[in-house]
Image (tube, rainbow, N blue to C red):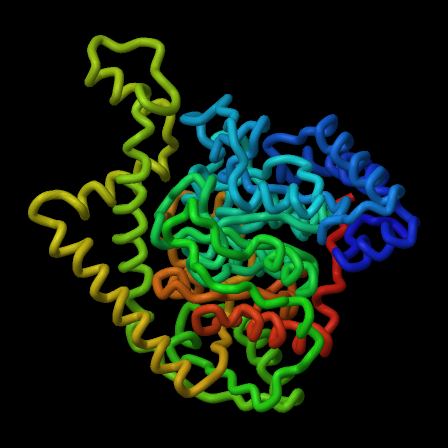
């Protein structure tokens, strides 16, 4: 059996039986990267020597019968907004070109403890600001299902790396849909946990009240296993939840009885692609056949989600990115006349167009005379959006919706239309504003052969319920078994 495109469970079983070594698995991953990443563009950095050394150590532990971690020997890719000791972390920005952190992010430490092998760092929209991975300062990432299309963003590199069979697992970050939307576009399982479920220590901040780290995998079991490894309290992150972590994998095969799924009337309106709507409704029919009850609900303030998000997120970004001034952190211009000119030149050269746009939006919303009218009002409507979800979850266990209004769009199609690009996250933004967990699962294909995702949202800390419900659909369909032919 070829390891390319195999699931996490399959690979772990093969290594346990001695059919693959970790070294052989990692060499296959590097061969796959060499064969197709010049066209896909998923990786910004790979570290073959360190990865193979780490894999050899895992193989040695396995031979000696020493205790092994949950991910022993599995190659994992990490989004390049997450700090990795000894490997570059650039946020796909010229501002951090050449930066190598002296420490690991919490999630990277957890990967190492679990004996995962970190293959390299994946491409993204600069500082995680974008929905297509076209805003990277270094390269454009392409969708393995159709190289003319985007893989989504901002975690497009992490999604493309798994979809193309370069790695079985990867890490992304989700501020407004940046895991779920690429997972939907690339035919993967991608999960955004409850805010605070996974530590953000070592995640370079975009919008601190919205950012969350989460997994990409081919199937629900892989995502559940990676989430189980990463979740838990970290005292270094003041927003990390001091809550016990259930075994997401233990109950995964137990169907949910009496499942009530809410469907918001606001999610099926003008602008939703007909093929996407058909795939989502077909997925709901699958759940009906499995005994679930589908209930109509309302999320009346969801129509404000895009406006609220693009008030709050840029405001937090303008504050977080103020540190990159050429003095404390980041790129410094080579030529300038005085200190003010040095600040302006350094930030002008270091940041890309989309990052500058969001910094300016945020600075305006926070400025004297406009704070109450924009940022404060945004926070109030954010509370109303959360109230809508609380009321909905009093009637249902989960909420189902599209992941995005269309399948993956063409590269360049929306890059000069920021509003249209922002609207590609219209179904995912609310979960970040409300701090809720959400998962994207494969639910079909367009007539053009592009994946379509189904989004499931749950109340806070309901990841186990979401994963069990996702697995119910996965058992009844075969969408998750399909792989693109990149080479």
- Return the x and y of residue 14 as percentages of the image width and height: 87, 54
Of residue 141 and residue 308, the one placed in the foreground of this image is: 308
Location of residue 384 with respect to 111 vertically, above or below: below
List x then y, in percent, for residue 214: 54, 54
Residue 40, quarter of the rendered image: top right
Q: Is residue 440 above or below residue 362?
A: below
Which quadrant does the C terminus fall into? top right
Above or below: residue 8 compared with residue 431 = above
- Whole-percent x, y for residue 375 in the image: 19, 54
Residue 125 visible from this viewpoint: yes
Q: Quadrant of residue 445?
A: bottom right
151 or 324, nearer to the observer: 324
Please provide percent x and percent y for residue 406: 51, 63
Question: Which residue is at 77% across, 59% downward?
Answer: 9
Q: Residue at point 50% right, 59% down? A: 192
Work out whether residue 414 can be spotted.
no
Q: Would residue 203 be found to the left or right of residue 4 on screen? A: left
* Rendered residue at 92%/49% (across/down): 19
């Amino acid at each position: 059996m070829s390891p390319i495109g195999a699931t996490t469970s399959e690979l772990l079983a093969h290594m346990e039986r001695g059919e693959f070594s970790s070294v052989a698995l990692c060499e296959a991953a590097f061969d796959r990267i060499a064969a197709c990443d010049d066209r896909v563009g998923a990786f910004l950095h790979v570290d073959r020597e360190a990865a193979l050394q780490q894999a050899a150590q895992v193989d040695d532990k396995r031979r000696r019968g020493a205790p092994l971690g949950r991910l022993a020997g599995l190659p994992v890719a990490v989004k390049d907004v997450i700090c990795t000791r000894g490997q570059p972390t650039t946020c796909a920005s010229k501002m951090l070109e050449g930066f190598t952190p002296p420490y690991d992010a919490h999630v990277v430490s957890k990967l190492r403890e679990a004996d995962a092998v970190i293959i390299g760092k994946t491409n993204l929209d600069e500082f995680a600001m974008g929905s297509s991975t076209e805003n990277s300062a270094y390269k454009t990432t392409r969708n393995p299902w159709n190289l003319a299309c985007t893989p989504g963003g901002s975690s497009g590199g992490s999604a493309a790396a798994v979809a193309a069979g370069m790695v079985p697992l990867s890490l992304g970050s989700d501020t407004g849909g940046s895991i779920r939307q690429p997972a939907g576009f690339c035919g993967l399982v991608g999960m955004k946990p409850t805010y605070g479920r996974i530590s953000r220590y070592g995640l370079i901040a975009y919008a601190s009240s919205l950012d969350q780290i989460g997994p990409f995998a081919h199937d629900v079991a892989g995502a559940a296993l990676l989430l189980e490894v990463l979740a838990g309290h970290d005292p270094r992150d003041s927003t990390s939840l001091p809550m016990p972590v259930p075994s997401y994998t233990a109950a995964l095969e137990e169907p949910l009885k009496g499942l009530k799924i809410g469907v918001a009337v606001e999610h099926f309106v003008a602008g939703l692609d007909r093929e996407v709507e058909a795939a989502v409704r077909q997925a709901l029919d699958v759940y009906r056949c499995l005994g679930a009850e589908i209930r109509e609900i309302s999320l009346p303030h969801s129509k404000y989600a895009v406006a609220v998000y693009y008030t709050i997120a840029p405001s937090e970004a303008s504050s977080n990115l103020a540190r990159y001034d050429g003095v404390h952190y980041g790129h410094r211009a080579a030529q300038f006349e005085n200190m003010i000119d040095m600040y302006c030149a350094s930030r002008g050269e270091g940041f890309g167009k989309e990052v500058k746009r969001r910094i300016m939006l945020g600075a305006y919303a926070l400025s004297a005379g406009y704070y109450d009218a924009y940022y404060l009002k945004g926070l109030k409507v954010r509370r109303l959006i959360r109230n809508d979800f609380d009321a909905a979850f009093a009637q249902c266990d989960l909420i189902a919706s599209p992941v995005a209004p269309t399948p993956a769009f063409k590269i360049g199609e929306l890059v000069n239309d920021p509003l249209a690009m922002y609207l590609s996250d219209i179904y995912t933004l609310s979960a970040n504003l409300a701090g809720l967990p959400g998962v994207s699962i494969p639910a079909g294909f367009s007539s053009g052969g592009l994946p379509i995702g189904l989004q499931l949202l749950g109340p806070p800390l309901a990841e186990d319920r979401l994963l069990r419900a996702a697995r119910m659909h996965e058992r009844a369909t075969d969408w998750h078994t399909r792989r693109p032919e990149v080479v």
